[in-house]
Structure formats: structure tokens, C-alpha cells
């Protein structure tokens, strides 16, 4: 059963050319689109394929995820996967392999074996509910990868999107330092409930069809010290189910000779996702590696909210006690004995610094130390179009969760 599951994950990670080789080897039709080829290959596996076909799957998988190989005497597989059938092979205490199966080893495995195929595959390929494999730690070598597959990375919450589900938890973009240009593949499947949520959220009121429930792709640095902002790897290119993804356009460089950069934002990939419970969705990511920097990818099911909803939520938090503002005024007017300059008056405008109109809902961030307020409605609407969440008075960060209506 375990071997069958491993073979299934191997098949799901193969590219079109490799699926065609596999189906041709098994004497099946090898023509069609990738999802059709993948379906035929999985049916072949489900029907019970011969040992020769199983060996072919493993061979193609090893080509798909190549690693440096040692000398022939060192190329051995770990015993737990293949029971001994004729004594011990080599001198490392490893069980003998079935006849005809080439022996492979992966660099960095101290006892000459390899991790299980499930461990070698990005865990996001294992589908919903299969992220946590109890036996994975026993197969994964300590030095097999530079970064954990699922680092303890948290992305910053996005005020305009409520997270409904985690389709791929933050996962390292595994890089091979010997190559500058990297490419890796991920896959996820939708449940019937998720398909229904997306389909029923279609909004055709505007000029184009859109969904309020979306599949959202995000990238960030693999840092665990605090929740991370969106951060694209250099020269990022994303294909979902073989179709190129629209990324934000490049910003014009501020200085001559500086390479233009894309603004790092969440990517809505709903339009290219297959709304199917049987066919998995594949994401192919290519990027340029950087020395000393690693990146993570995550995919979420989210519900988009409007500025009106965010304003209602802000109102529901209540109004800050007027005593706080009084205390702040007294503090600013209190003479500092160490200073020769005394503040005798404070000037605060009733016009919003954003729209230059009278304040309707005076608002500040909890982290701001100034008395001047800005209009909550206008501030949220501006961040709906271009999310910067910077206070227009002091130019410091003023995220939505820190906003409070002034008393």
C-alpha cells in the first residue's frame, strides 16, 4: 500500500514528455493534454501495473529529480524498501535489490541510502490531508536539503482577504546551488466543497467575470522571526496547469542602471485553476537563485472583502476612549525640564490629509504618537486600490489591525 502511494506521487510529479514515455512503454495511448496523460497514467497504476512498469516510473522519477551520484559500489537503496532476496549487497548492510533494478544513491545520505520517494517529492504534491507523514523524519536525511520542506514561515495577514483554507502550506523553493536558474513543481487538489465555494462566488456584475472566492498564490522569504511580507524571487516565472500566470508589471527604476523590479503581491490564479475534484492542479515555478537567500511558496483559498466590509469591522471594534487623547495632549503640553523650548499650543486640522476634506470618521493607528487623524473611509479605500498601509501623517506603518477610531 505504501509503495503504491509512493508510485502515485512519483507519477504526479512527471512532465508531459515523461508521461508519454511511460504510457508508450506500457503500450497505452500516449497522446493528449497533460491532465489526460496524468489520468491515464494513474489509471494504469490503479489497475495494477507490472514490476517492469513500476521500475520505469522510478527511473523517470529519478531523471525528473536528478542528483549527483557516487561510484557504482556506493549506489545502493535502503533496505527497508526492498527485503533481502539473496544476501546482503556490498559491505554496507543494505538488502539486495530485485534483479534488473539499478541501484541509486543521493548525495548527503550518511548510510548510503535514499529517502523514500514521498520524502524526495515536494510534500505539497501529496495533496490535501497528506501533508503530515508520520514516518517522513525516519527517511529524510539531515543533510539532504539545505532548507526544511515546510519551514515555520508565516505570511502577513491580508486585510482584504479572509483565509478559508490552506491548499499548500508555506513550502521551501528547493534550490540546487550548482545552478543559477531553478525550477520546481507543486500540485494540489480541490475538495468538492472548495470547488462549490469558488463556482458559486462568480461575480458577473462588472465588465469581466471574476470570483470573490479565489485561489491565491503567495511568495515570501523563508524567515521565521516574524510574519513575512510578500516577496518575489528574482526573475520569477509561474505556470499553472501549463498556462503562464500574469504577474504584476515591472516598476520603473528609480536610478539609472538599476534593474527594474516587480511589486510583490499575492497572485490570483483562480482563472487558470481546474475546478475539478479528480484532476490535480500543477504549479511550475522558475526563478534565479540568490546566495544566502531562500524563498517559500504558499497557496490559499481566500474570500475577497470590500472596503465597506473592512470599515464595518473597524466600527465594530469601538471608539477609543476620549481620555486617551486628553492624556496625550497633556503629555505634549507638559514642560520638559531638560529643554529650553516649551510647547504652549497644539494645532490639529479637521481636514483629512489624504482627501483634504472634512474628517467624517477620524482615525489613527495605535502605534502613532501624533494627535492628527485621517479619514478611515478614504484610507481604507486607497489601500484597497494600492495596499501600502502607511500613515499619511507620520509615514510610519499603519496596518489595518492597528487602526482605531478616535474618540
Image: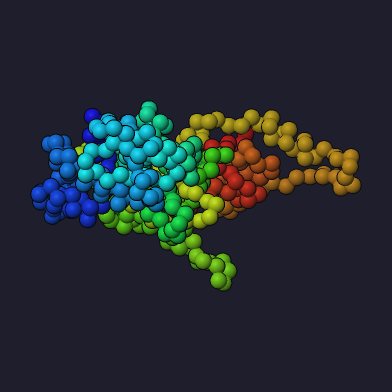
Looking at this view, is 164 or 204 the one in front?
164
Q: Image quadrant for the C terminus?
A: top right
In percent of the image, x 35 and y 35: which residue is there?
A: 94
Way the structure is coloured: rainbow
Give the quadrant of the N terminus.
top left
Number of marks in the rendered image: 0
Residue name at image x 63 percent, y 48 percent:
396
Q: In the image, is 215 to the left or to the right of 260?
A: left
Between 24 and 347, which is closer to the camera in this rendering?
24
* In this view, 47 is above or below 63: above
Residue located at (82% from left, 44% from top): 344
**Residue 405 sits in quarter:** top right
User: To which quarter of the image does residue 40 belong?
Assistant: top left
Query: Which residue lies most toward the top here?
Result: 134
From the top left corner, tell me how far across and down residue 7 is, in percent: 24, 39
329 vs 68: above or below: above
In the image, residue 69 sits, relative to residue 304, either above or below, namely: below
Residue 81 in view (yes/no): no
193, 115: nearer the viewer: 115
Is residue 178 visible in the rendered structure shown here?
A: yes
Would residue 406 be found to the left or right of residue 19 on screen?
Answer: right
> Which corner quadrant of the image does residue 328 belong to?
top right
User: Where residue 371 sits in the image (x, y, percent)?
Assistant: 68, 42
User: In the rendering, at what x and y percent does residue 259 appear?
Assistant: 51, 66
Residue at position x 47%, y 38% in the image: 142
Q: Measured from the top left, where is residue 196 in percent x and y? A: 24, 36
Residue 389 located left or right of residue 42: right
Amino acid at each position: 500500500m505504501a509503495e503504491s502511494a509512493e508510485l502515485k506521487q512519483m507519477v504526479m510529479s512527471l512532465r508531459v514528455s515523461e508521461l508519454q514515455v511511460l504510457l508508450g512503454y506500457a503500450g497505452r495511448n500516449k497522446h493528449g493534454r497533460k491532465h489526460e496523460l496524468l489520468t491515464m497514467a494513474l489509471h494504469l497504476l490503479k489497475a495494477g501495473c507490472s514490476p517492469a512498469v513500476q521500475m520505469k516510473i522510478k527511473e523517470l522519477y529519478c531523471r525528473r529529480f536528478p542528483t549527483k551520484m557516487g561510484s557504482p559500489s556506493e549506489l545502493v537503496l535502503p533496505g527497508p524498501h526492498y527485503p533481502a532476496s539473496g544476501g546482503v549487497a556490498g559491505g554496507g548492510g543494505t538488502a539486495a535489490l530485485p534483479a534488473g533494478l539499478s541501484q541509486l544513491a543521493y548525495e548527503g545520505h550518511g548510510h548510503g541510502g535514499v529517502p523514500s520517494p514521498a520524502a524526495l517529492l515536494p510534500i505539497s504534491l501529496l495533496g490535501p490531508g497528506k501533508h503530515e507523514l508520520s514516518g517522513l523524519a525516519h527517511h529524510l536525511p539531515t543533510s539532504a536539503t539545505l532548507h526544511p520542506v515546510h519551514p515555520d514561515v508565516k505570511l502577513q495577514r491580508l486585510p482584504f482577504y479572509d483565509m478559508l483554507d490552506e491548499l499548500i502550506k508555506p513550502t521551501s523553493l528547493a534550490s540546487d546551488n550548482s545552478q543559477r536558474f531553478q525550477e520546481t513543481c507543486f500540485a494540489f487538489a480541490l475538495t468538492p466543497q472548495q470547488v462549490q465555494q469558488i463556482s458559486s462566488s462568480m461575480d458577473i456584475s462588472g465588465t469581466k467575470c471574476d470570483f470573490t472566492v479565489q485561489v491565491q498564490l503567495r511568495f515570501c522569504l523563508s524567515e521565521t522571526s516574524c510574519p513575512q511580507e510578500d516577496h518575489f524571487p528574482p526573475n520569477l516565472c509561474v505556470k499553472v496547469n501549463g498556462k503562464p500566470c500574469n504577474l504584476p508589471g515591472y516598476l520603473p527604476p528609480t536610478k539609472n542602471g538599476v534593474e527594474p523590479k516587480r511589486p510583490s503581491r499575492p497572485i490570483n490564479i483562480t482563472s487558470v485553476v481546474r475546478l475539478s475534484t479528480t484532476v490535480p492542479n500543477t504549479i511550475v515555478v522558475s526563478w534565479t537563485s540568490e546566495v544566502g537567500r531562500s524563498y517559500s511558496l504558499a497557496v490559499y483559498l481566500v474570500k475577497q472583502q470590500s472596503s465597506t466590509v473592512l470599515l464595518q469591522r473597524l466600527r465594530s471594534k469601538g471608539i477609543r476612549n476620549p481620555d486617551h487623547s486628553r492624556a496625550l495632549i497633556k503629555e505634549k503640553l507638559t514642560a520638559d525640564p531638560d529643554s529650553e523650548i516649551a510647547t504652549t499650543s497644539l494645532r490639529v486640522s479637521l481636514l483629512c490629509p489624504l482627501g483634504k476634506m472634512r474628517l467624517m470618521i477620524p482615525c489613527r493607528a495605535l502605534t502613532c504618537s501624533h494627535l492628527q487623524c485621517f479619514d478611515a473611509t478614504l484610507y481604507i479605500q486607497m489601500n484597497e486600490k494600492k495596499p501600502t498601509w502607511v500613515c499619511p501623517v507620520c509615514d510610519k506603518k499603519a496596518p489595518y489591525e492597528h487602526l482605531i477610531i478616535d474618540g
